[in-house]
Image: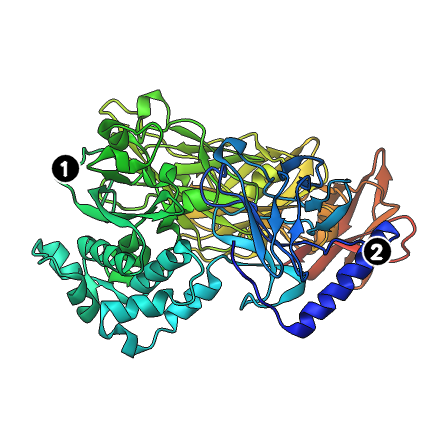
Amino acid sequence: MRRLWIGVLLLSFLLVMAAVGAEEASGASSEKPAVLIVRAELNPPGDDGGREWVELFNPGDRVTEIGGWSITTTRNRTIKTFQPGTIVPSLGTFDVKFDKADGQVFFDSDEAILLMDESGRIVDETPVLNDTGNDRVIWTKLSEDGNALLQSWRSASLYQKIDQHTLDAPAEVESSLDSLALYLTKPAKNDEERARAIYRWITANVEYDVEGSMAGVCRGRSPEEVLKEKKGVCSDYSALFQRLCDLSGIEAVVIRGYGKGYGYSVGPKIPKSSNHAWNAVKIEGQWHLVDSTWGAGHLDPKEGFVQRFEEFYFLTPPEYLVWTHFPEDQSWQLLDAPISKAEFEGLAYAKPAFFKYDMKIVGHQVGTIDAEEGTNVRLSAPENVHVIAELLDEEGRKLPKRFAQVQRSLDDLLVRAACPGPGNYTLRIYSRRGENEDREVYDWALDYRIEAGPKAQVQTGFPVVWDAFWDIGLDVKSHPEGLIEAGSELNVTFSAPKDVLLLARLLDEDGRELSEDWTFTQREDDENVVRASFPKPGNYTLRIYAKRAGEPGGEYNSAIEYSVVAKAGIEGMTYPRTLGTFAEAGASLRCPLEGRLEAGISHELELVVPGAEEVALINDGSWTPLFKEGDDIFSGEVVLSKGEAQVVARFPKDPSYSVLLVYTTV
């Protein structure tokens, strides 16, 4: 438990409001002061079991017994019933922690927590909370300094207050380890916050000694030397962490072993001698794992040491850290069933993003994949986590995007790789959380090694797809491979729900987008057809966008793209320019498909416009009505003047005409 003090005015206000609220709820004045839910962790790092918690606060002026009370959720699940004699002190807090045997007690989304008394009356409840990140962001009703209660809930870092104190450390407290330890831990309320302050200071102030590490001449600095020089390697970081813990009254040890760090690739066996050091720290009688070296930043082949704080390596769940850290003494894995060295060597290479974004491996725990047995990897991830993949050759060079593809169905992911020939490859998977799919910042999450033997077939790859392709229900009908060899024109067909609209654009080999009249998209019978023509031979990208008709916002999202090698080209062979009404009406053009028509000669025009009452062609101020034949088919012969020709339509209950198509007449 810990004390939480608030101002007299705020306390008086809360007491009055609690009393009023209790009277209104029960119809009579309650003798018991209210107990409030003030903080909650729904989705902590790790597999959740034993790590979720709720914090209660008693704003009253006397102790409140909560024996027989319970923590419940809006999904009608009783999570915890308190034993008789359980109390929450006056102006104090009570931490409700869950045993490992309880498993996951809260859902990660759409979960509201209720505190109920022994009669089943709701004493307090949270709003609906969502926490889909395996991080240390919690929900709280406390102010940033922790000394006041707010009217509404907010999300915040669990360590916000102690972190800020640490980062504000004045230079004079760094004169000795004793004075530094005293300053860092002074406001800490428990051993976890003391260890956090030490971790945060080291990661913010000690630079990795790249030159010494690469040269193999690390001289083994003492903690005092590390404090003075603000530089060291992993053994120096871990020794400093241990010393500061000792000075702060916390039990900590240095762990030596092997780390899958800078330069690691899946496959090779780990060396016999250790190459890394980290720590274990005892908090509330249990050991936890810390790596302040990796928490301080990472090595970059161009920039050297990049100091960038990494939350993940503080109190990292053992089941996570074992993917990259193998201690010489296997007991320091802190697992009920430690893994062997061979198992550690064989694992896929998992990075912090893999765990923070709550990703899971459904198959292929082993990191090396034989291409002859298939190069598919199955994963799961929350729906708001976006995943992409790429294939790298043995030199670490990125291959074209078509050699890796991610297929998605809700939480299920299928990552596919295509090998362009014999050799060893790295399948690298990236992820990020968020709704804006076009944001380019993805975090490295997972690596696999793919071994394609000498008899491996040459594969051309897959179309590059985005989440919208799967979400909107598209399916490739004509071209399942990502590289297409074409003549001067190309037709690609898809199946899609009737309310799906497609838009296509052509890019040249330098990535420049060509004018829209080089592509033409329409629905023909039960298929969506995308046409493209090429101004000259060469390499192109055909990118297709999709959206649902009538969807708010009306924006097209990237859906699928092909690499195209055009063997021929026809300069000026463009298509009519379509406007939004053409696709939204489900119109289909039968002829002419050429966008540039010769003036002064007769042209046969025919198109299908479902639901239209009238269709006409406007050219040089003249209107030529088209005749309706059968089911929504409009046709007619027209002689055009130079300039522009518009095909327009009028629909029921709308007196105005909408432009469907635009031709250029020359």
> From what the image shows, is residue 35 above or below residue 119?
below
* 252 or 567: nearer the viewer: 252
Q: Amino acid at mark 2?
A: Ser
Q: How many marks?
A: 2
- Where is residue 116? Give x, y as percent: 72, 44
* 90 or 316: nearer the viewer: 90
- Where is residue 633? Give x, y as percent: 81, 38
Q: Which residue is mark 1?
A: 271
The residue shown at (80%, 53%) is: 30
> From what the image shows, is residue 378 above or below residue 114?
above
Find residue 25 and name its label.
none
User: Quick check: 275 left or right of 554?
Assistant: left
Image quadrant for the C terminus? Answer: bottom right
Label whose residue precedes the other's in the sequence (1 or 2): 2
Q: Which residue is mark 2?
A: 29
User: Quick check: 515 left or right of 401?
Assistant: right
Q: Amino acid at mark 1?
A: Pro
Is any atom of residue 387 visible in this view? yes
Tag 1's secondary structure? Answer: loop
What scheme was used to colour the molecule? rainbow
The residue shown at (76%, 50%) is: 638
Disc 1 packing (10 Å; few <14; some 14–19; many ≥20): few
Tag 2's secondary structure? Answer: loop
- Where is residue 255? Give x, y as percent: 22, 44
User: Quick check: 161 left or right of 495?
Assistant: left
CA separation in Å, label 1 and label 2: 71 Å
* 54 or 479: nearer the viewer: 54
The residue shown at (29%, 41%) is: 324
